[in-house]
Structure formats: C-alpha cells, structure tokens
Amino acid sequence: MPDNGRSPAGAATVTLTIDDREVTVPKGTSLLEAAALQGTALPHYCYHPGLSAPAQCRICLVEVEGAPKLQPSCVTMAQDGQVVKTDSPEALKMRKGVLEFYLVNHPLDCPICDMSGECKLQDYVFAEGREHGRGREPKRVFGRDDFGGDVLYYGDRCVMCTRCVRFMDEVARDSRLTVVERGSRAVIDTFFDEGLEGASFAGNVVDICPVGALVSKDFLHKARAWDLDSTPSVCPGCSQGCNIELHTRDNLVQRLKPRENAEVNGHWMCDFGRANYEGLNRGGRLEAPAAGRGAKRRPAGWDEALGQLFARLQAAAGADVKIVGSAEWSCEGLAALAAVGAETGEVSARVFRSRCAADEDRLPGFPALARRRDLAPNVDGARTLGFSRVGGEDAAGGLEEVAAHDGVLFVLGDDLADQEAAFGEAASLFVYMGAHGSEAAANADFVLPVTTFAEQEGTFVNVQQRVQRFWPGLRAPGEARPAWLVLGALLAALRGGEAAPASAAAAFSWLAGERAAFAGLSYEGLGAEGAPLAAPAGGNGAA
Amino acid sequence: MAYPYRHDREVRVMSEAFGDPAARTLEGWKARGGYQGIARALEIGRAATVDEVKASGLRGRGGAGFPTGVKWSFMPREQNPGRPHYLLCNADESEPGTFKDREIIRWTPHQLVEGCLIGAYAIGAAHCYIYLRGEFFEATGVLAQALEEAYAAGLAGPDVLGSGVQIDLTLHVGAGAYICGEETGLMNSLEGRRGEPRIKPPFPAAAGAFGMPTTINNVETLAAVPGILRHGGEWYRQWGTEKSPGTKLFCVSGHVSRPGNYELPLGFPMMDLIEDVCGGIPGGKALKAVIPGGSSVPIMSADECESCELCYEGVAAAGSMLGCASVIVMDETADIVKQVRRMADFYAHESCGQCTPCREGTAWASRILRRIEEGRGKPDDLDTLLQISDQMTGTTICVLSDSLAAPIVSAIEKFRDEFLALIRRGERVGAA
C-alpha cells in the first residue's frame, strides 16, 4: 500500500515537529491538542475541549516557522512538516506579557477565593509569570453578582475567557449569559433577572471557569481545594451514571465534580446530580451486626452473626424466598444476594423500588447526557440481574406480598421507610442489610450493616447498559462491610467451600463468570471509563 | 468656491461637487456625468470591470492600501448554489482625525451608490450593505434619499439599467463603535452580534458576512471607482506615483490655518500640504509633529515631515503610514503626552475586550499616561509603556491594540524629553 499519509485505520494523519520532537496526529488536530498529545501542556483559558475556540485569551500563542507572528495554538491546525516552538524566547515573552495583563486588574484575593489551589491563573503565573507586578494603578472594581441558581460571579477575578457564555449558548442551548460593555469594562452578565435560576445544567459554568470568577454558592468558603481528596466515582442521582469525582474532607462529601467520559457525560453533569450528595453524608448509620428479633436483638460480631445466619439458611433449605434489593447498591452485591437466595430455596420475588421523575432533562448540546427518569444509579444493573421494579414513582408501596411473606426474606439497601413495624412478622427468616436502621426491620432476625457505594469499590450499570466502576471516597462507619463481601462469604459457605471473593475485583470476576450479561468483562479492563455489557440475547431480563 | 476651503493645487476628481447641494440629487449628479461608470461596467462585463480597476492601481482607501482590483479577484469566479456573494461598504468612518467618507456621502451620495453598484457587479454580488456610522445623522438622511432615487430610477433593484442584473442596496446604520469599522467586527455587527473582530482565516472572500463570500471596501475606494470605469484605468494613473496611483482626499486638522478635506494627487509633498494648501501654522509657530494617517499610525517629528511625500510608500519610508490620510498637525505648543494619553483613552474605550493584551493593555497604558500627565510619573514608567506596547503588538485578533502601540512607541522615541520633563517635575514637587 502506498504511503498516502493515512494510518492503517484509514484516518488521515499529519506529522509535525513540536519543540524538536516529531509527533503524528489525526488531521484536524489543533496545535494545542497536538502539543498535549506530545506531552506539552500549553496554557489556555478560552479554549475548552467541549466548546468552540474563539482564540481570544491569547495565552496559547506559539511560534510556527514561516508565520509572521505568533499563532494561537487552539485554532491553528496541525499541518504536515510544520515546525512549532512552544518555548521559544518570543513565545515565552508574550505569554509572560499576557499573564501580566491578566494581573493588571485581578484582585489577587487568593486567600479568600474558593478557586485558590486549582486556579489556572495561579498555576500559569506561578509557572511562567513575572516575579513582581509593575502595576501602580488602582484596580477596577466590579463587585460580585448573584447569577441565580447555585452560581455566584466575582467580576474582578474574571479573565473574560467567555467559556461560561459559550457553554450556555452551545451546550445548554439556553443563552442566559452574555458579555456586557467592552474593553476593560467588560463583564459577564445575565440577560434577565432570573439569571441562571432554573437552568438545569448551569452548574457546569462553575467547573469550566478557569479562575474564581464563577463559584458555587453551595461550596462557598466550605473547603480549600488542597484539603480535598478526590475519588473517581459515578453520580448516584439517576441512571445516566455520569462519571464524577467525589471531593471529600473529614470523611464528608463536600461537592461532586464531573469527570470526563466521552461516551457518557462528556465534560458535564446536571445540577440535580451535583446537588444530590448530602445523602452520602447522612449520619445515624448501622455500625455493627445484630441478631435476634425485636426485644431479643443483641449485638453480634460478624463471625457470630454470619455463623448463625449460615446455620439458619441451611436449615431453611428449600424454602420460599423473597428478595428486596436496591438500585443504589452495586451489581456485585445484588448478584451475590440473588445467588444466596437461589442457593437457599425457591426465589418467588426479586424486586427493588426506586424513585422516578416525570420526564427526562436532556442537555441539548450533548444529547447522550440527560437527567434520566430513573433517579437511582443502578436501575439497569438491578434489572439485568433479574430484579424487577415495584411500588410507586416515589419509591413507596409495592411490598404487600413481601411484608406478609412466611418464608425467607432478604432486604438489601431499601430502608423500608414507608413500611409498618409488622413488616416481615410472618417470615421464617428475615435478613435486613442496609446502611441505616428501620422501624420496619424490628422483625429482622439479622441486621447487617453494609457500606454505601461511596464507601466501597464496585460497579453500576447505567441506562446505556454500560458497566462503570466506582471507588471508595469515604471511610465506612463502624464494622460496616460491602454487601458483596458479606453475601459472597455466605454464598461460598452455602455452596460448600467455594472460595469467597476477598476483593471487589474478585467479586466482579465471580459476577462475570456467573452472569452471561457480564461475560467477557474484566474489572481491570473496565478502567475508569467503563465498558458496555455484552449484547443481551433476546432481551436483558428487564421487567 | 465656498466649500470650506479650496486650493488651486487640488485635483478634484471626486470632490468637485463638494459644497454644491445640486449634486446631491440624481438629476444633478447625472448632469455631472453620473452613472456612466455602471453603464460601461455592465457593457464590458464582470471580468473586464475587475481588470479596469486592477489597471488603475487603485488601492484601498480605508487605511491598509490593498489593491482594490486584486481584492475583488479573490472572490469565487462563479457563485456556488446557496452561497450568495455580498459587497459591504464600510462607511463606519471613526478613525480619529478622519472626515472624508462623511463628506463624500453628504455631498455626492450618488457617487457612492454608483461605486457600490459597480463593485457589487464586479464581484457577482446581488446585495450590497452600506454600514454607516451611527453618529452620521445628516449623512444617513442624504444617503437614504439617494438610495430611494436610485431604486425609483431603476439604477438599483432587480434589473439594473435594464441589464437583467440584480443589485440591492441596503443602508445599515451602526450604533457607534470604533471596532465596528474593523471589517470582521463590522460583519458581526451587521449580523446582529457583538461587534467583535473574527479570527482570520477564514478570510471574508471565503466566509464573510453571514458566512458567505464577501468583499468589503471603504467609501472613498468605491467612490473612486465610477470615474475609473468612465474614463479607464490609465486615466486614473495620470495622477499619483507608480505604486500609489490616483488622487486621495486628505483630511487635515489641527494647527493649520485652513483645515479641511483636500483632494490631491498621491505623492504630494507633506510640507506643501501644510504650508501652502492649508495656509501654514497660525501665528507663525513652529511645526512640532504630524500624525499623517489617523490616530493609529506612528507620530512623525517635524524633521521627518520635511521631505515626506504623501503616498503609501513615501510615508512608509518616513517611518509612519499613510493610513487613511488623516493629517493631524501639531505646532510647538502641543502637549505630546496629553495627545498620546487622549489616544490611549480612546483606544481603551473602544477596545472590544475580547483579546487580553488589548483589553488590559490599552486601559493600563491609558492610566499610566494619565499619571505621567498629572505629574505623578516614575522614571521606569516609560520602559513599562514600551514593554506593554510590545506585548500589544501582533498578539491579538485585530490590530486595535497595535494601533495604540504605534503612537505610544513613536511618541516616546521621538519626544522622550517631554515625558521625562513631566516625570521630573512631578518628582520635584514631591507628587506621589
């Protein structure tokens, strides 16, 4: 095959030299992106991979051989044979100059700015800026402006990159922000009094603001960026499963931030999901296993509780089993629960309850992303594993038969808030596993504390049938254990000496061996971005 | 003749009718030879029209001096389906010191209308927009009247002069922003967006107004075209120099006895313009400096003016630019620091605010200059100003900040003592 500048895949490529190193990139790649691929991170404000590039911040200027002046690397496309210098004296001088301009009016109020520590102005000035400013002039003052919703605008800190304006125009397709005035008097403002109030994706403008001009009211003065730990996770708000980071401090989630995943959520997440983290910080947790019904309930160690439970399950062999799962618990936990049920006897019900919204809320500029109707992260996982949804759109009701069941009853992750104290009264064996206690668990023979998804490793399946991993961002309270660990041990014992999974990876590989939908997937292979389930053969078992 | 001032050495090709209200009407203009240019263009065809303008050597009068015929030839030869061509007439005259386009429109609106028709025909545009500066109230009325007459007489509209060629003319009045005179800023403004210059490429000939192939010409450029079509390109070359053919309106302001618009052949000696045509500096004062081409160009000292010829290459050789030939004359009493500060104020006010070096640099420079002017300067301020200017040059989307850098740098280079005197005086009186 003649060399026509095409890679084997058929996509055209170009080869250029950046800072004396050759790099081959797909045709249509900007110099900024090409430099990034080659390992050179060029500073930039107005450029954002999810938005158009207006080339106005002028800080990504590079020297291109043959061009009369420095070129903005964000809009200059890579060409064959191009020779680019990102660190030539001229380019460095201009970047230093542009950074000085940014500081002419910047208030330098880093000590009280929420962005401090993750601010691109701080980073770039520290890396390439002047040691001392030369400004003697008083700085202009704009003050701050409540943009509505969760967004607060500090005009003095603004670098006028207009990412926020373009996000609202191009991605949210809800033009609520604009630049008013011109020159150094220019500020970002809202068109109408309601501002961003009611715009359901507006929180993203805070994420994409490279400085502290747009900040979250919810997070305002709550924590310093360098005190936060960041853990990759999946948003529990709905079945979209946006990839997120849990930002935690003092074992509390402080905020959620979107994590890029081109297949699921791009760079974005919705405000509903973003605001929906307080549940993860809820106190009053179950901390130790307990055994015994009602007044006879006594704390028990895990060994004791599981030993007794194992004996009871063996004794109940062949019983009628009903299982209540939850769409907020991991696939591994739910699968192990289903398997324990099947190992015990005849499973006559495998159900879960979850809240539903009236409609979807789609992000027009990134239509793969929507706040889905199912307001729980693992609805599709639960369905794939054979659970069916019962009850109303408010996640209540639907458990009449279960409540009155006279066989073996398992509840995992549903705190039965709407159920009566008589729930499970007739059950021959009632096992309650959850993060929080419940009045309706009074009749439980065993109350086992399990961890939430934020405290353990595991996977969810999103609405696209994509399996996605999450990692523990919080320490589990007391003796709480992941459901897959508890149920995995029971299952191994019930199956007569099978090895119990000792890690989330082992639990997932057990799942992949047990369930056809997960066949061929490896925990390692899922990585941080997940992978689709195997194509279902004649339906995915959804109810 | 009465029009503010006239002089024998003028060559009044375009400006003969200035001051003559009778020339404003269609009838009056036709009596003076009007609309013969478009008739000839329609007769010889598109390509020949472009060639005629190329042969004349006419260069863009908006400031850049790009050859007009060459610019027209950048347009696609044939119109692609769904990709109409547009001609834009830049009548957003707002360069400080410039007042020629306003006079062309006020006195000879039909000259511009005819120029627009020829230009549109030459580039295959069925629609020409005239973007007129918002503050030109009188010109707006005059031009609107002329357009009405042109439509009524079948000179504009679906069938120009019975040729079957359609050329519509639309008058669009701006809201008064300097940056909307920048060609791509003008396009954004015309489309109803913020008047912010666009990144090039794409160039207007590929994707301009409404994303379509577009040519944009200055009023004076288009007003020169009817004569060229009527008399031929060679006729136009009888004036001016080899590289700068033809005549040009010079807007002279400042310290001269007879300021005003004078149409002169390009290459005219600058000192003759000041001393002879404009009657010299009043009160016998000495010349200090000249800004030869509108506020955006480097200031020239009196020495540099001595042998300077007013043509594109002549002023360039003297270290400045002809620009739009707006000659601002300053005598020995002029305060250079104040003049530069006023320019800086202007550019800071008019910066669109997109690009960081311009948004912050122009405002910062204006504040430093203000401080120096008020006697609170520091010795290192001049270095700071020069570095700011360097950082504002060639780093932005359009050339607005370059246009402030040029006067600042040239003023500091040529009149450093004036800056230093102010700084020292401030130090002496102990100003903080």
Image (spheres, coloured by chain):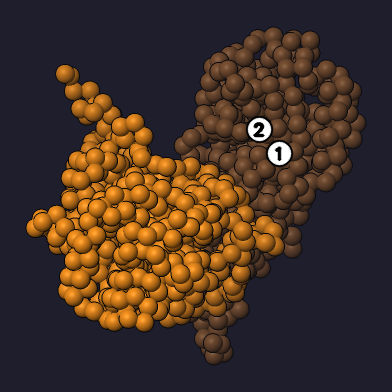
Chain colours: A orange, B brown
Which residue lies at the image location 62% right of the left edge and 14% below the top edge? B46
Residue A426 position, x and y percent, is 39, 65
Q: Which of B109 and B158 is in front in this view?
A: B158
Residue B60 position, x and y percent, is 59, 34
Residue A407 position, x and y percent, is 33, 58
**B28 is higher (above) or lower (below) than B327:** above
Residue A304 disc label: none
Callout 2 and callout 1 share a chain: yes
User: How far apart, in angstroms, are the residues tagged by discs 2 and 1?
Assistant: 7 Å
Q: Nearer the viewer, residue A128 or B335?
A: A128
Which residue lies at the image location 14% right of the left edge and 54% below the top edge? A495
> Position of A251 compared to B348: left or right?
left
- The crowding category of the residue bearing disc 1, from other C-alpha atoms within 10 Å (few below 14, some 14 to 19, many at least 20), is many
Q: Do the residues labelled 2 and 1 touch (CB within 8 Å)?
A: yes
Q: Nearer the viewer, residue A115 or A442?
A: A442
Three-letter amino acid code of the residue under disc 1: Tyr
- In the orientation shown, which residue stands out farthest toward the bottom? B430
Three-letter amino acid code of the residue under disc 2: Leu
Which tag, 2 or 1, sits closer to the chain's start?
Answer: 2
- The crowding category of the residue bearing disc 2, from other C-alpha atoms within 10 Å (few below 14, some 14 to 19, many at least 20), is many
Secondary structure found at label 2? strand
